Image: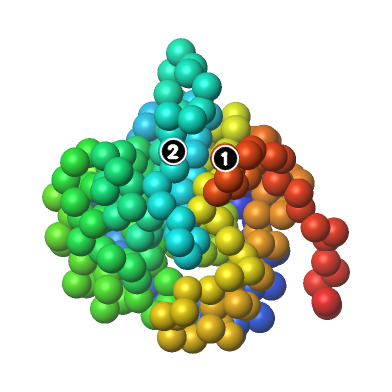
Amino acid sequence: MRYRQWAPEYERIQAEFGFSLEKERAASDRLVALLPRPALDRAEQRIRARIRGRETIVVGLAPRTGAPPVWMLPRTEEPPALIVADGAAERCLAAGLVPDVVVTDLDGPVPSEVTANARGSLVVIHAHGDNIPALERWTPEFPRELAGSWAGPPERGLVDFGGFTDGDRAAYLAEGVNAPRVLLFGFDFDHIDPSEPSPDIKRRKLAAARRALDLLAREGRARVEVWAADGTIAPYAPGEPESPSS
């Protein structure tokens, strides 16, 4: 999936949620200023080197879902890569799994993401219109390898592989660096954590995330599959494409 394929869907999301491109750019400018210089150098190539064309597990933060039981997967010559979304880093670390990549907009349990970074994870920090305070608070805390992303065209050392929420952005990242198979674990678009402060907005965001993954499954190069809580693995089944006016 290339940026030009993803951009029309993000324009739809911007219109749906009223996101301001000016605010997005302001946040990305602040992230560029906060990141250490090496984080802005060859970001896509460094992420690609982490994945190395391996099959990839992408871990979401669905309610009541733990870390992926990687021992259940068939043994392969090279183990799968592990990309986690935001707070799923905490679950993986608790299970003794250090992610290859963490994708975050810094709205979850960030200390666990800092810990993952200290233990070797590359953390991709995402800038969006309303997270400048989080960028300023947390970006300097990460001790090791970083990259930055935003919702506009890749530029100024920031990447945009596509995707909207941390989970689907992690899946787009995996596909974008040539993972042949993207195995989704801990994704749930129908149930919301009871502690969620804005359930209606969360439902709308989950619906947009589902659309994003539908697009990735239809048009991306990777094979997208779902690893269910009962251990079964099945192809991701996208819904029918919606018209822009629907």
Label 1 to label 2, Cα distance in Å? Answer: 9 Å
* Amino acid type, callout 1: Gly
Mark closest to the chain's N terminus, 1 or 2: 2
Label 1 element class: loop
Instruction: Give the vertical position of 9 relative to 70 (above or below).
Output: below
Q: Which residue is mark 2?
A: 69
Q: Position of residue 66 (x, y in %)?
A: 41, 52
Q: Is residue 98 left or right of residue 13?
A: left
Q: Quadrant of residue 127?
A: bottom left
| Quadrant assignment for the N terminus | top right
* Amino acid type, callout 2: Pro
Q: Is residue 161 left or right of residue 130?
A: right
Query: Does residue 12 appear in this view?
Result: yes
| Quadrant assignment for the C terminus | bottom right
Looking at this view, is 72 or 33 the one in front?
A: 72
Residue at the location (58% across, 85% down)?
Answer: 200
Q: Badge 2: how crowded within 10 Å, few (<14), some, or many (20+)? A: few
Label 2 element class: loop
Q: Are marks 1 and 2 in contact (CB under 8 Å)?
A: yes
Looking at this view, is 36 or 183 the one in front?
A: 183
What colour scheme was applied to this rendering of the protein? Answer: rainbow
Instruction: Give the vertical position of 8 relative to 172 (above or below).
Output: below
Residue at the location (72% across, 53% down)?
Answer: 215
> Residue lying furthest front in this view?
230
Q: Which residue is mark 1?
A: 231
Instruction: Give the vertical position of 85 relative to 22 (above or below).
Output: above
Q: Position of residue 164 (x, y in %)?
A: 55, 64
Query: Does residue 124 appear in this view?
Result: no
Looking at this view, is 98 or 162 the one in front?
A: 98
Q: Which mark is residue 114?
A: none
Q: Position of residue 84 (x, y in %)?
A: 41, 49
